[in-house]
Image: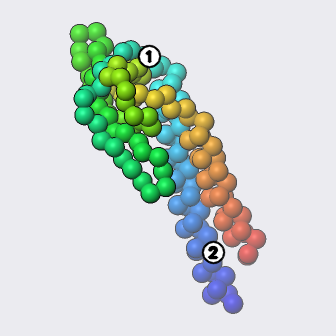
Amino acid sequence: MSERITKYKSVFTVLSVVLLLFATIGYFRAYDRYRFEAVSQETIGVLDEHYTVITGRRSLPRYKVQYSFKNGDQVFRGKDTIRERPVSRVVTVYFDPTSPQKNNLIRREAGDQLLTAVLLTGLGLFPLLMRKAVS
């Protein structure tokens, strides 16, 4: 019986480490999104003529587009995936003025990413608590 408990403790520990690692990545991604939202500016951009339709069995089609926009005298390019079929080539581009290479067409909020990170933290701590309860 002692071997079995030791085996479960090891499994719980590995599971905890993996979940906490994913949670940490989630926190960093949420922070990056939050920072982008705080400093981003918007400008007008132009879509390329061609786009790719991405279809799935259970999901609505999405569209992979490429676009360009100007910041000062420089022209920057970007790629994004959008949910609605492009009907106009003129789009709003959100970009980081200190690093215009960081840009997108959709404002993505950090809330969803942060919630996922919090849930993964709880799930990662649960096996550690269970490990102590088993001992």
Is residue 62 shown to the viewer in this render?
A: yes
Q: Which mark is residue 16?
A: none
Q: Residue furthest right?
A: 133
Image coordinates for residue 53, horizontal then vertical, percent: 34, 43
Q: Residue at x 57, y 66 (%)?
A: 15
Q: Residue furthest bottom?
A: 1
Q: Is residue 4 above or below residue 91?
A: below
Q: What amino acid is labelled 1 in the image?
A: Gln
Image coordinates for residue 77, horizontal then vertical, percent: 27, 26
Q: Is residue 50 above or below residue 120?
A: above
Q: Secondary structure at mark 2?
A: helix
Spatial CA span between label 1 and label 2: 49 Å
Q: Residue at x 45, y 37 (%)?
A: 83
Image coordinates for residue 89, horizontal then vertical, percent: 32, 22
Say which quarter of the image contains residue 102. top left
Tally of marks: 2
> Position of 109 compared to 90: left or right?
right
Q: What amino acid is labelled 2 in the image?
A: Lys
In-front residue for pair 105/102: 105
Colour scheme shown: rainbow
Residue under numbered circle 2: 9
Q: Secondary structure at mark 1?
A: strand
Q: Residue at x 69, y 61 (%)?
A: 126
Say which quarter of the image contains residue 133. bottom right
Q: Residue at x 37, y 27 (%)?
A: 87
Q: Residue furthest top?
A: 72
In-front residue for pair 122/106: 106
**Which quadrant is home to the C terminus?**
bottom right
In-front residue for pair 3/51: 51
Is residue 96 shown to the viewer in this render?
A: no
Residue under numbered circle 1: 41
Image coordinates for residue 18, horizontal then vertical, percent: 52, 61
